[in-house]
Amino acid sequence: MLKMIIADDEKIIRETISSIIDWKAIDIDLVGLCQNGMEAYNTILDENPDIVLSDLKMPGMNGLELIEKAQKTNPETRFIILSGFGEFSYAKEAMKYGVKHYLLKPCNEEQIRESVLECKEECLKLKYTEETFGQAQEAAHRLANAALFNIVNDCICQNGNLEHLIHRYETYIDFDFTAYRLSYVYYLPYSELSSFLAELEPLCKRLMPGILIHGIYVNNTLLLYYRNYDIHYSELEFFIREYKKNTLAASLETSSALYGSLRELLNVIVPKLSRYGLIYYVNDFRATYTCNYKSHIDEVDLLYKKIRDGDPDAVQSFSENLEGISSLPFIKQITSSMLMKLAIKSPGVSSQTLTDWLQEIDGAEDIEYIRKTSMEHVHTMFYMNSHRSRESQLIQTIYQYVNDHLKDPDLSLKFIAENYLYMNVDYVSKKFLKETGIRFSQFLTNKRILRAKELLLSGKYDKIQFIAEEIGLGNNPQYFSQLFKKATGMTPSAFVEQASVSIDV
């Protein structure tokens, strides 16, 4: 479901638009009604809407300023502009920013609905085409696959606690806020697994481009699970039922179930897997068996806990443990699992760094090279200063990024999530609100106002525009003054004057 906000300083207009159309019926989630441009921009930072329906003439920040700033944050956002008669010059200016949809007030329900549906079609094409599948998304998929492999493997081979494991890996994957679909493929013999996956791959990439497909194969049954996608599944079901229908001993059958979250889905399937001795995990349409060398796995898990708690002898013991492994798939499994677990407890290791490490091990074919490389990374994390606080590593990473890039006028949670954390922005936004109690836009505003106060009191800047630039508001002193007054109740100059009086007293 796509997200949309409405921004108009006239209450009757924004509330009328919000109520005259059944938004749920056209798969639109109306996430905000905003009374001015500043409020709309903060909502854009927090909600990352796909569509914004906005008036052009608004106080504080007008529609043109809103479009300009929002396009820098996310150029994929689609705008529908509302304008009164005689304001067409403003509309033409908005079109310079790529705005294609223009409604003249007063407009009716059908005009609004038609414009939103056109925007929806554009958004879906952008959201689910191969062109959007870039390096950041590939990295996010790699991390998600590694996390889910570790969860399944730890639960089956070590009788691990599923809820504990989900908590451990929630930095890398959304377990709570996205619906998932589970499809079963029955009567698929192992001899046909590779062939079936090879033919399934192009179909899934055509039907569900950009959607990561996870899979588990046990006892002639393939379980495919993936983020719920707005398509008709008849073509996928037809492919399964018709696959080598006349040559297999038994025709393939399929069924599916929808779950509100990945956590809910895993709680259903993982307990059922524990009864099987041999399990194959499907990653990128390739099946890899999980090596159930229980004694090795138990020892490595114990060593991980000791390394995590700062025991230097455990690092050496892990190195010796690797010396006793001669299976290439198993040493990849063990070292990747150890690095991922340690990285979760090491705030200094970014998602990008961990992705590079995992990719390095996955692509290696020499066991000795894997031993040497993985131990270098273990030593790096062991001796790294891993300061911990009440917030998770995810939140600490966001804090640090904001501190380092506060001057960036285009700083947004979307950019941090997709290009630095390699995660879905909606998930990161919800986690941020859950852990901190405030939305990201409010946190960013608080940081900027705090920094502005420090600069104002330092006396080093005699012009407001310089302070605006230093705190990431660009060369826009008017917007800075409005933001400062809204946050503090006084203008920047009044704040400095009040502070001077306090010092003199």
Image (cartoon, grey):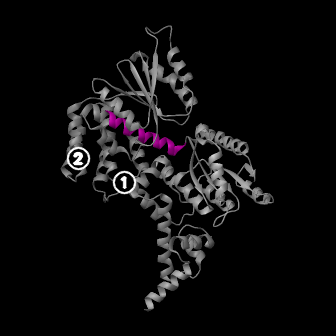
Place of residue 139 in the rendered image (x, y in percent of width and height, measured from the top left): 47, 43
Q: Quadrant of residue 261?
A: top left
Q: Amino acid at mark 2?
A: Lys
Report the side of 266 relative to 490 (left or right). left
> Circle 1 — which element?
helix
Placement of the N terminus among the 4 image quadrants: top right
Cα separation between marks 2 and 1: 18 Å
Q: Which residue is mark 2?
A: 305
Q: Which residue is mark 1?
A: 393
Q: Amino acid at mark 1?
A: Gln
Q: Which residues are magenta?
A: 134-152
Q: Earlier in the sequence, mark 2 or mark 1?
A: 2
Placement of the C terminus among the 4 image quadrants: bottom left
- The extreme right residue here reads 86
Report the side of 227 relative to 97 (left or right). left
Residue at 26% x, 31% y is 157
